[in-house]
Image (cartoon, rainbow, N blue to C red):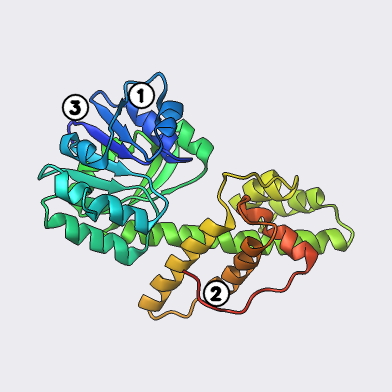
């Protein structure tokens, strides 16, 4: 994409707001943004050159490349393929880059459907924290044909320090879901061991220090363990167990499609289902440690949407 291309950005939430701000600050061309809540635009993009678009249709008609940062596949479907969505109003030759996390099958469906309207599609889900989004230091995993990847990579570099090309459409979501599932499983394992160590007479901060110097060290230990589980800091408006369950649902769908019995993912889902049904609801997902401390029973293995 030309450095003077017009960027459109839809979804200015916890991650989308700071990502769009980086684009508005770094991109020499126009940046047009939209959200269901105008206040999100005002808060995230104050003092930048970003322009407000009153609708998806208006944004799609002007943008050369459209970035999406939305809660999940349902919202991406509506924005891309709905009656007043991108497919109906975008310029032929434009590009959609979806930074959201969706099912792999959905990403491939969106790519095919938009192609019929002359619009290219790349799934490019992001990893790391909101602070990393503010600093423009995210990790982005991209699913797109090679030529499209080369076109969009310079723009993704506005928000990321690490960009991985997974392959064709859908592979960005594969990489993101694998990453997230490993984090979710590791948080549960660390929470269990923190509780075990403390009840066996070792202070949790000592346990974290000791393990961080051995082969059990990890990003989850240093980040989720030290910053959330140790001080019992589980704020609202972070990444709650409800979001975890959405991603695990995508993982289990992918495992079924790949003919793999993901038993540990199923067990991990039960932990977060219990957390979401109890005191962990709406709070940062490492609050699952409170469930373990309380010795609460896990739900049966029923399916979750």
> How far apart are the two marked residues, 1 and 2, measured between alpha carbons?
42 Å
Q: Element at badge 3?
A: loop
> In the figure, is residue 146 to the left or right of 299?
left
In the rendered image, the residue lying farthest to the right is: 201
Residue at image coords 68%, 62%? 278
Q: Do the residues labelled 1 and 2 touch (CB within 8 Å)?
A: no
Q: Circle 1 is placed at which residue position? A: 25
Measured Cα–Cα span from mark 2 to mark 3: 47 Å
Q: Can residue 218 be seen in this view?
A: no
The vertical placement of 197 against 133, above or below, is: below
First in sequence, mark 1 or 2: give its number. Answer: 1
Tags 2 and 3 in contact by the CB under 8 Å rule?
Answer: no
Label 3 sits on residue: 4
Q: Residue 27 placed where, x, y %?
A: 29, 27
Does 127 sit above or below residue 215?
A: above
Q: Mark 2 points at which residue?
A: 266
Q: Earlier in the sequence, mark 3 or mark 1?
A: 3
Who is closer to the viewer here, 167 or 211? 167
Q: Where is residue 106 in the image (x, y as percent from the top left)?
A: 30, 63
Residue 216, image quadrant: bottom right
The answer to whether residue 129 is visible is: yes
Q: Position of residue 200 (x, y in %)?
A: 87, 63
Q: Is residue 15 above or below residue 293?
A: above
| Quarter of the figure that contains the N terminus | top left
User: Dot 3 surroundings within 10 Å: few (below 14), some, or many (20 or more)?
Assistant: few
């Amino acid at each position: 994409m030309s450095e003077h291309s017009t960027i459109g950005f839809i979804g200015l939430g916890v991650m989308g707001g700071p990502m769009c701000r980086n684009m508005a600050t770094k991109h020499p061309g126009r940046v047009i943004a939209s959200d269901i809540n105008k206040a999100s635009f005002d808060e995230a993009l104050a003092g930048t050159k970003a322009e407000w678009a009153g609708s998806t249709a208006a944004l799609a008609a002007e943008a050369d490349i459209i970035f999406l940062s939305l809660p999940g596949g349902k919202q991406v479907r509506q924005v891309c393929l709905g009656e007043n969505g991108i497919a109906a109003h975008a310029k032929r030759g434009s590009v959609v880059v979806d930074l959201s996390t969706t099912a792999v099958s959905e990403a491939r469906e969106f790519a095919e459907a938009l192609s019929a309207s002359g619009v290219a599609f790349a799934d490019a889900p992001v990893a790391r924290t909101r602070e990393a989004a503010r600093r423009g230091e995210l990790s982005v995993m991209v699913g797109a044909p090679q030529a499209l990847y080369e076109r969009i990579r310079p723009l993704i570099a506005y928000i990321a320090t690490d960009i991985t090309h997974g392959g064709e459409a859908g592979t960005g979501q594969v990489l993101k879901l694998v990453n997230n599932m490993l984090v979710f499983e590791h948080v549960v394992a660390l929470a269990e061991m923190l509780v075990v160590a403390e009840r066996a007479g070792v202070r949790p901060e000592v346990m974290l220090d000791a393990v961080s110097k051995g082969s059990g060290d990890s990003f989850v230990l240093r980040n989720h363990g030290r910053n959330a589980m140790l001080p019992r800091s589980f704020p609202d408006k972070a990444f709650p167990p409800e979001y975890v369950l959405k991603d695990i649902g995508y993982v289990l769908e992918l495992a079924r499609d790949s003919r793999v019995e993901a038993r540990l993912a199923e067990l991990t889902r039960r932990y977060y289902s219990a957390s979401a049904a109890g005191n962990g609801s709406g709070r940062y997902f490492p609050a699952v440690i409170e469930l373990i401390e309380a010795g609460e029973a896990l739900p049966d293995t029923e399916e979750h949407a």
